[in-house]
Image (cartoon, rainbow, N blue to C red):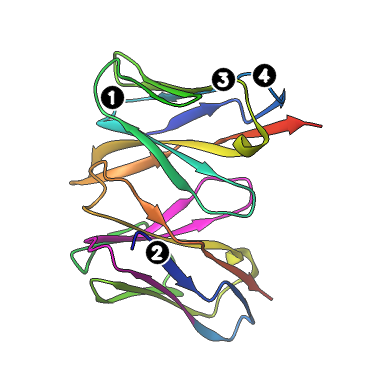
Amino acid sequence: GQQVMQIPQYQHVQEGEDFTTYCNSSTTLSNIQWYKQRPGGHPVFLIQLVKSGEVKKQKRLTFQFGEAKKNSSLHITATQTTDVGTYFCAGTTFMDSNYQLIWGAGTKLIIKP
Amino acid sequence: DTEVTQTPKHLVMGMTNKKSLKCEQHMGHRAMYWYKQKAKKPPELMFVYSYEKLSINESVPSRFSPECPNSSLLNLHLHALQPEDSALYLCASSQAPSGGAEQFFGPGTRLTVL
């Protein structure tokens, strides 16, 4: 079936270092969404990318959607303790007469003490 | 009001019990979802309601029974669950069925089946 692969599974960084997570789909996506889930919390929508090659920024977060609309990345500059959590990408694809959201496995951002 | 509420927050039930999870949103969203999330895993879609009609059932066992009484409410009825059904159950809503619409998640119900 259709999959969205997300790597790495975990990333340990020192506070102030950068963080990047990557998603790759086996098929072309209609769009891709990014969510953040804090420990003990629920997923919270961050952003949606729709256009080929799109780049969007939210303060220290930069989101990219590949030219082929099959891959995406999230880059956080100068991480802070408030960035801790798991970041999920979720790609939208049209399948079985419905739009479906295919979730990546998530990347957990851990700040080293 | 941009909030999805879920009750209860925690639920412990035996394998012979019947219980219900409730979800409510007042954003005028026409799509509502039930997800199951195990630890260290992404949310796993269970059901989608679109305009109060069940549009997607991801081959979920019949011991889970969804209900959408109206456009603001979504229930999940539980009966004869197994210990492996213990998980965080998340409700979400979006303006339209998942054609790329942002999903708003509730805080979830943490279910333990003994």
Estimate the spatial distance between the alpha carbons at disc 2 and disc 3, rounded to whole Å.
Answer: 31 Å
Estimate the spatial distance between the alpha carbons at disc 4 and disc 2, rounded to whole Å.
Answer: 34 Å
The magenta-colored residue range is B20-47
Q: Nearer the viewer, mark 1 or mark 4?
A: 4
Indicate the position of residue B44 as horizontal and vertical percent values.
Answer: 46, 51
Give the mark nearest the N terminus, 1 or 4: 4
Give the mark nearest the N terminus, 3 or 4: 4
Q: Nearer the viewer, mark 1 or mark 2?
A: 2
Residue beneath disc 4: A17
Disc 1 residue type? Thr
Residue beneath disc 2: B4
Element on which disc 3 rests:
loop
Element on which disc 4 rests:
loop
Estimate the spatial distance between the alpha carbons at disc 1 and disc 2, rounded to whole Å.
Answer: 31 Å
Disc 4 residue type? Glu
Whether residue A48 is situated above or below residue B41 in the rendered picture: above
Estimate the spatial distance between the alpha carbons at disc 3 and disc 4, rounded to whole Å.
Answer: 7 Å
Residue beneath disc 3: A77
Disc 3 residue type? Thr
- Of A51 and A60, nearer the camera is A60
Q: How many marks?
A: 4
Taking the magenta stretch, the answer to whether it contains residue B84 is no
Taking the magenta stretch, the answer to whether it contains residue B33 is yes
- Chain bearing tag 4 is A
- Chain bearing tag 3 is A
Asked if residue A99 lies left or right of residue B39, the reply is left
- Residue at image coords 52%, 45%: B42
- Residue at image coords 64%, 82%: B14
